[in-house]
Amino acid sequence: DIQMTQSPSTLSASVGDRVTITCRASQGISSWLAWYQQKPGEAPRPLIYDASNLQGGVPSRFSGSGTGTEFTLTISNLQPQDFAIYYCQQYDSFPWTFGQGTKVEIK
Amino acid sequence: QVQLVESGGGLVEPGGSLRLSCAASGFTFSDYYFSWIRQAPGKGLEWVSYINSGGSTIYYADSVKGRFTISRDNAEKSLYLQINSLRAEDTAVYYCARAPGSALRNYYYYYMDVWGKGTTVTVSS
């Protein structure tokens, strides 16, 4: 199984900051990576697919990059509604696997 | 509008069974592949199962293999998850999610683009 490791586990930031979350795969997954945002009591919201493509309706302050084993999710100009948990997920091979999550909290 | 609505969750005793359903609307159901994903209380996301458009390709997580069965009814625009021999560790919110299939995508790698709100399964005596 492909292991997905996110860092950091928790990130403290302020409104207006630029934040970056890293996701590493235990083996190469090309660009077959997605990012999700989840707020308490809600379903995950898809943000990015194929490592760098924004899902419909996702603000342009979200961006993704990377290929192979290392990927990043960047949120520029952090907004109050962006405080949430973020997950990466690989769909290169089954079983699909998720990172453990990164909580973005208010500093 | 595009929507997935899960149902069928509830409180069940260990060893019991449930059938989860996911009703789709607002899109061409047969163009999409589907997965079930679960989230135990206070934990992260765990992919559970996948089915392609015709039901000919199915995968399961090792943790549920032999106990869970995924299926779909394209005429009814519905996805199902039969869960048997339930254990305490199956307690979770279960989400269904769609993935654009080969009719919509040039690659053989499928990402999930719409999720339902989930249904809660609690296994307890």
Image: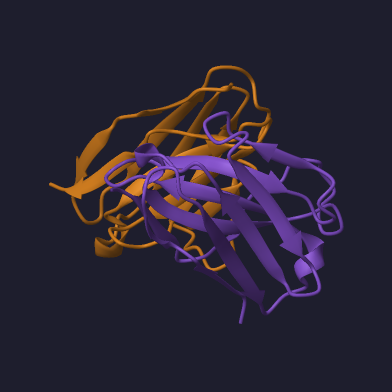
Give left or right: position of B66 versus B38. right
Q: Quadrant of residue A82?
A: bottom left
Q: Quadrant of residue B42?
A: top left
Indicate how the structure is coloured in the image.
by chain
Going 24% across and 36% down the picture, which residue do you hit?
A: A10
Image quarter in which the N terminus of chain A is found: top right
Q: Is residue B9 above or below residue B43?
A: below
Q: Position of residue A102 (x, y in %)?
A: 32, 39
Residue that extends furthest to the top in the rendered view of this protein: A27
Give left or right: position of B93 versus B75. left
User: In the figure, the purple chain has which letter?
Assistant: B
Going 28% across and 58% down the picture, which residue do you hit?
A: A40
Going 72% across and 75% down the picture, which residue do you hit?
A: B27
| Chain A drawn colour | orange
Q: Position of residue A24 (x, y in %)?
A: 48, 24
> How many labels were placed on the picture?
0
Going 81% across and 41% down the picture, which residue do you hit?
A: B108
Give left or right: position of B106 versus B117. right
Q: Is residue B64 above or below residue B121?
A: above
